[in-house]
Image (cartoon, grey):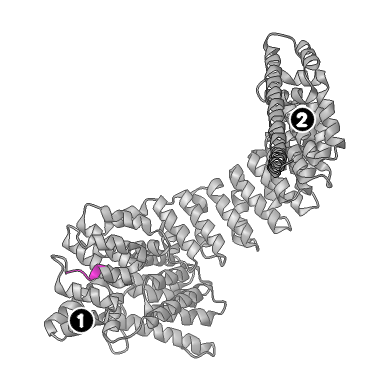
Amino acid sequence: MSVLVLVLYVGLGIAVLALVPGISVIGREALRRRRERRAVERLAAARKVLSRLRAEPAERVARSLAQGFDRSTIQAALSQALDEEARCAVVCEELGLRAAWERTLRDSKSWNERAHAARMLGKLGAASASPALASALANPHEDTTVRLAAAEAIGSIPDIAVLPHLCEALASQGEGGAKVVAEALISFGSDAVRPLVRMLDDERAQARTWAARVLGKIGDPGATLPLVAQLGDGNAAARAAAAEALGHIGDPRATRPLVSAVLGDPSSAVRARAAAALARVGDEEVVGTLVATLGDPDPEVRSRAVDALAALSPKDRSAIERALFDPCDDVRRSAALAMDRLGMVSAWAAALGDGTAEGRAAARAALVAVGRAGLSEAIVAAARHEAGAVRAGVFRILGEIGSARHVAALGRALDDAAVEARESAALALGRIGGEQAITMLGRDKPEGIPEATWIVSRALVGVETWVAEARAFMADPASAAAARAVCEAEGETLVRAFEAKLCAAGPAERGRRTVTLSRFAIAARRAARLEDRIRAILELAERRGPEATAALAEVVVSDPSAEARGLAARSLAQAEERWLVVPALVRALSDPSPEVAFEASQALGLGAASEDKTGRRSSEAAPSERNGASRRTTGKLFLKETGETAA
């Protein structure tokens, strides 16, 4: 044998060895596809036999299936047909499939098979399968997937005999499993109310809590009184679930118990859910309770109270407006969303272009608070208003909000058709600052914008060359007067910012002042000691601003001390935010303390003028001198009496 022949034999052997695995794989795949094709054909034939149920008795169809097909094909066909044809249940009974599925659910070692059997029994919808499903559901050692499948199956079987088993499973399941069992109970509607009401007396707190939740979802008024009784439960979660359920039911009989829970429950979760429930069960009578709840120490409770007030849509919305200045971000955002839903944001935006100066200032302060609460999109939408004065006001507000998200819109506004709007956009860009604002202001001065406005806007950004340009501009008295007029027209904040840039003062001082102001606002509302609240009121009276005014207005109507209420009322006399001041002072006129009522009348300008020891009438003195001296004197005297020294 030559070498060439040997090489050929070796190559042929290698080729055969390489082809054998490939041929084997191809053969197995061909057989698998053939089996699948035959299974599909058998399944189609079985479905065709099942379709004869419309014309033939179920017993004859069952015999045809048993004679012509294997059990797996029959089960696969029935699995889909049970969803479409109710008479397939009779076929299952004739073929003994229900008993087979029950045995599988009880005895199979595979959790997947047991779960499939539970689902098939649910599709079957036979009441006789309920005991087997209830047994699987109540078994604490059963797989979670099987128990969930059993719960879903029981929910599809209209057999009230399983309600006790479902109630027991509801109490023993974990959070995920209890949700499925709860859905099954809800499907029974009013039939499940009585066993669930009995569960409210269960020793297990989880059972009482879930029973209240399910009763609320069912919404039957017959559960109102038992749920009202549960508001006195020793477990906070059970009380919270009862309050939430009463809100879902909406029975007016729950109004007074919910009011008591809002005002007196020690748990903040219960108070929050009771406040939300009052919006569904109450009417205008509960508005006062919800307004008082805005002074709750827990922010979630205050946020729920704001939402409830918005749902009731009261005529007097000043309480929601005061919530715009709450120390908590979530409460402020809830208030902003509430005012937007009530249509107040668009109304305030429209007020920027007309009305009195006081009305415009109030609208501006409110919109700034809305923007800082995170709802600036509603304000930006008003930038398309047809009135130039409104657009100008919106651009000023965006500058006060100070978010870099608005720089692009303000840059486009530099070419606005109204000169006033272009000026406001330039100043707003200066107040916001940042690289993008610098780019916007680096262009040539837009037509119509005064030189002083452009100089101030660029200086606010803090670029050294622009600040030097502003210093040179201020060297001329007439130019300096024009620049000061621009700043004063925008408010004290802009005046301080411009002066700080010219004097090279950093913004850290302003940041510290803002933090300190918020701290005093919180202390005036929440401090436990009276002397701390007095000191905070004195500081707020000196600093002023919307946040300080909102805090003082809340103190006037809610502080337990007459001294603090009187001092706050006197401090509000010079506040510019009259839209916040007047409602609080009007309520203070009916204060049980004569001193507080007198101070409120003086602040409103209703009291008679009196003469001081020098013979000059107090009304002849300058307001700032008169009220400032009075505030300082009262505060220092009180702190001296309590053994403290005024800051």
Q: Residue at x 40, y 67 (%)?
A: 585
Give the magenta range.
Answer: 440-444
Tell me the quarter of the picture where residue 548 sits: bottom left
Query: Which residue matches tag 2?
Result: 121
User: Which amino acid is tagged 2?
Assistant: Leu
- Does the magenta portion include 46? no
Comparing 496 with 270, the one in front is: 496
Q: Can you name the residue that lies furthest to the right here?
A: 107
**Screen quadrant of the N terminus:** top right
The residue singled out by tag 1 in the image is 470
Q: Is residue 164 above or below residue 505?
A: above
Q: Nearer the viewer, residue 360 or 559?
A: 360
Query: Mark 1 vs mark 2: which is more N-terminal?
Result: 2
303 sits left or right of 443 in the view? right
Residue 82 at what x, y percent from top left?
70, 24
Would you say residue 562 is visible in this rendering? no
What is the quadrant of residue 566 in the picture? bottom left
Judged from the image, the secondary structure of the residue bearing numbered disc 2 is helix
Against 422, residue 207 (above or below) is above
Residue 611: image tag:
none
Q: Residues within 10 Å of mark 2 (few under 14, many from 20)?
A: many
* Relative to 623, residue 244 above or below: above
Residue 303 in picture, x, y percent from top left: 52, 59
Residue 66 vertical placement versus 151 (above, below): above
Residue located at (68% from left, 18% from top): 47
